[in-house]
Image: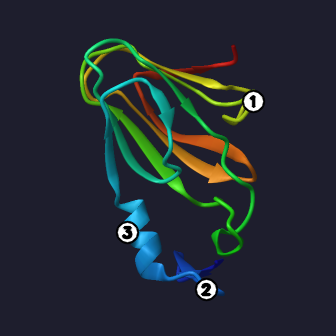
Amino acid sequence: MSKTTKQGINQVAFEGSVDPANVLEAALSLTEYTAAGAIAEKQGTVFLKTGTAGAFTLAAPTAGNPAADGDDGKRLLIVAEDAKAYTVTTPASKIAGGNDTATFGGAIGDLIELVAFGGVWYAANLINVSLSAV
């Protein structure tokens, strides 16, 4: 995938065997987790609704272009569907800034939006979620 800018608007061109329809489908996917555990998705939207505070893990993204099986540019939105204090933990320092844990504040609608680049998750948006290194 290559990026250019025309008249201030970012343009994306897919290279190789990447099918833009598959990228869009994956980006728009929705998954609900009703039990704590590993979050398998690396893009799309994940809703957490376990009924109790739950601990989740999230793998680090793979550095590189999606056309070469990398995750750069993928966006993952994780949303609390119920009012629970969730945690999402990645491997050490895999959330930019030396962080590895996102702690949700315990309200419906708490969320973190993550963007993958270079093998690290970047927090693009936080609502009532704090980041820390454990």
Up-down: is 20 above or below 34? below
Give amino acid for label 1: Ser
Image quadrant in which the C terminus is located: top right
* Structural distance between the alpha carbons of marks 1 and 3: 29 Å
Q: Position of residue 104 (x, y in %)?
A: 42, 20
Name the quarter where the N terminus is drawn.
Answer: bottom right
Going by the image, does 97 lie left or right of 83? right
Q: Amino acid at mark 3?
A: Glu
Residue at image mark 1: 93
Residue at figure coordinates x 28%, y 29% from the top left: 109
How many neighbours does mark 2 have within 10 angstroms: few (below 14), some (14-19), or many (20 or more)?
A: few
Separation of marks 1 and 2 at Cα, in angstroms: 32 Å
Question: Percent position (x, y) of residue 46?
Answer: 37, 42
Quadrant in the rendering for residue 112: top left
The residue drawn where x is 66% and y is 26% is 100
Mark 2 vs mark 3, CA separation in Å: 16 Å
**Left or right, residue 57 beside residue 85:** right
| Label placed on residue 25 | 3
Q: Which residue is mark 2?
A: 17
Q: Quadrant of residue 82?
A: top left
The mark nearer the N terminus, 2 or 3, is: 2
